[in-house]
């Protein structure tokens, strides 16, 4: 991974996220899933009858994390993007846009992709954690490594 990678570039290179949702009464649920990014906006698919789908119907907000743990134990090369925001179930032209993004990223998808349920997470908060030195950032220390937490405008 390039040393000066932006959050948007990082999101564009990764393929899976962990999505955290909650039911209307606050019971949390987290699921891994494939996604595509358009800047910091994330598109994903999950059936409406899954716990994630039911939670999003009841409570259409979510948090997501996309993380990369490099091989070989080089913890300081790890990166992650944390996002939080409103989630909308897509239909019509918006769903077709999501399908097009998925099919351009994952060429092996068949026409069955047209029968999936798509969602869009529009973040109101994005935090990019890395070990790069940049201005206007917050640093923390964990595992003996100084991490940079950079707020990114969605």
Image (tube, helix red, strand yellow):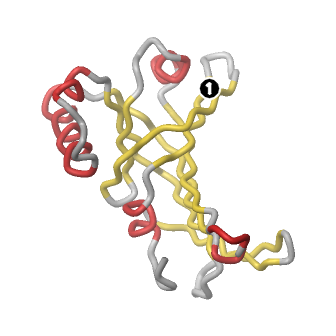
Q: Nearer the viewer, residue 42 or 114?
A: 114
- The image shows residue 44 at horizontal and vertical percentages of 38, 37
Identity of the residue drawn at 30% across and 55% down: 38
Residue 74 image point, x, y percent: 70, 75
Question: Circle 1 sits on which residue?
Answer: 22
Total marks drawn? 1
Left or right position of 67 against 44: right
Residue 93: image quadrant is top left
The structure residue drawn at horizontal position 83% and vertical position 69%, both measured from the top left corner, is 142
In the image, residue 102 sits, relative to residue 4, either above or below, namely: above
Question: Residue 82 in the image: x percent, y percent?
Answer: 57, 55
- The outermost residue toward the right is 144
Seen in the picture, residue 113 relative to 150 is either above or below; the reply is above
Drawn side of residue 134 relative to residue 6, left or right: right
Relative to the observer, which residue lies in front, 78 or 111? 111
Judged from the image, the secondary structure of the residue bearing numbered disc 1 is strand
Q: Is residue 111 left or right of residue 88?
A: left
Can you say whether 154 is above or below 144 in the image?
A: above
Q: Position of residue 149 (x, y in %)?
A: 65, 70
Q: Residue 77's quadrant in the figure?
A: bottom right
Disc 1 crowd, CA 10 A, few/some/many (<14, 14-19, 20+): many
In the displayed orientation, state which residue is furthest to the left: 93
**Residue in the image at 62% along x and 68% along y:** 70
Left or right of 9, for residue 149: right
Which residue is at 35% across, 42% downward? 43
Which image quarter is the C terminus in?
bottom left
């Amino acid at each position: 991974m390039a040393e000066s990678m932006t959050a948007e570039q990082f999101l564009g290179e990764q393929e899976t996220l962990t999505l955290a949702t909650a039911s209307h009464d606050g019971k949390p649920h987290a699921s891994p899933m494939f996604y595509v990014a358009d800047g910091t906006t994330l598109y994903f698919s999950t059936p409406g009858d899954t716990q994630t789908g039911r939670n999003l119907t009841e409570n259409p907000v979510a948090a997501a994390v996309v993380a990369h743990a490099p091989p070989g134990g080089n913890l300081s090369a790890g990166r992650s993007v944390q996002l939080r925001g409103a989630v909308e179930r897509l239909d019509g032209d918006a769903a077709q846009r999501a399908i097009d993004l998925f099919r351009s990223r994952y060429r092996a998808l068949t026409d069955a992709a047209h029968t999936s349920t798509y969602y869009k997470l529009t973040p109101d908060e994005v935090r990019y954690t890395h070990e790069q030195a940049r201005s206007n950032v917050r640093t923390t220390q964990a595992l003996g490594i100084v991490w940079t937490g950079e707020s990114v405008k969605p």
